[in-house]
Amino acid sequence: MIPVPKPFTHRSDDYLDFIRSKPCLVCGRGPSVPAHQNLKMGGMSKKVHDSCAVPLCNDCHTNGGVNGEPEHKGLKTFWDRNNIDVMREIIKLNAEYMHLKEV
């Protein structure tokens, strides 16, 4: 039997520091914590890459902020209620980070 290698999960402390420097996507407050978004990139118990993290303040991340729906209770509901296209935000954050690294 051939062992199956464990999938690689990209980790970047620099990127997470960049995310922490941003205001919360929902309410605009800080400080922010990196909220990793599972974008169906694997099965259950798969770790999410750091590049899929977005900034959320602790209140929005744990208590749901303005709309009272915690982010971890249902991602689609959370982002729909806050009228945020999280995939677009992830792409924008990654592009901004890559531009900063080039300069």
Image (cartoon, rainbow, N blue to C red):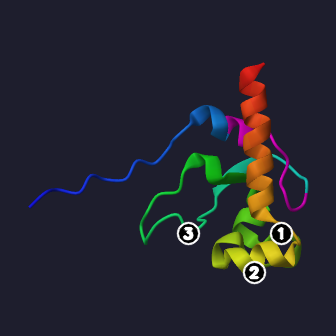
Residue at label 3?
Answer: 40
Regarding mark 1 in the picture, which secondary structure is present there?
helix
Circle 3: residue type: Lys
Q: Residue furthest front?
A: 2
Circle 2 residues within 10 Å: few <14, some 14–19, many ≥20: some
Which is more toward the observer, 101 or 70? 101
Question: Would you say residue 90 is visible in this rendering?
Answer: yes
Cα separation between marks 1 and 3: 24 Å
Q: Where residue 99 sits: x, y (%)? A: 78, 30
Q: Residue at x 78, y 18 (%)?
A: 103
Question: Would you say residue 20 is visible in this rendering?
Answer: no
Q: Residue at x 37, y 53 (%)?
A: 7
Circle 3 residues within 10 Å: few <14, some 14–19, many ≥20: few
Regarding mark 3 in the picture, which secondary structure is present there?
loop
Image: magenta residue range? 17-27
Numbered tag placed on residue 77 in the rendering: 2
Q: Residue furthest top?
A: 103
Horizontal arrangement in the rendering, residue 44 relative to residue 58 (left or right): left
Residue at label 1?
Answer: 65
Numbered tag placed on residue 90 in the rendering: none
Q: Where residue 48 sits: x, y (%)? A: 53, 56
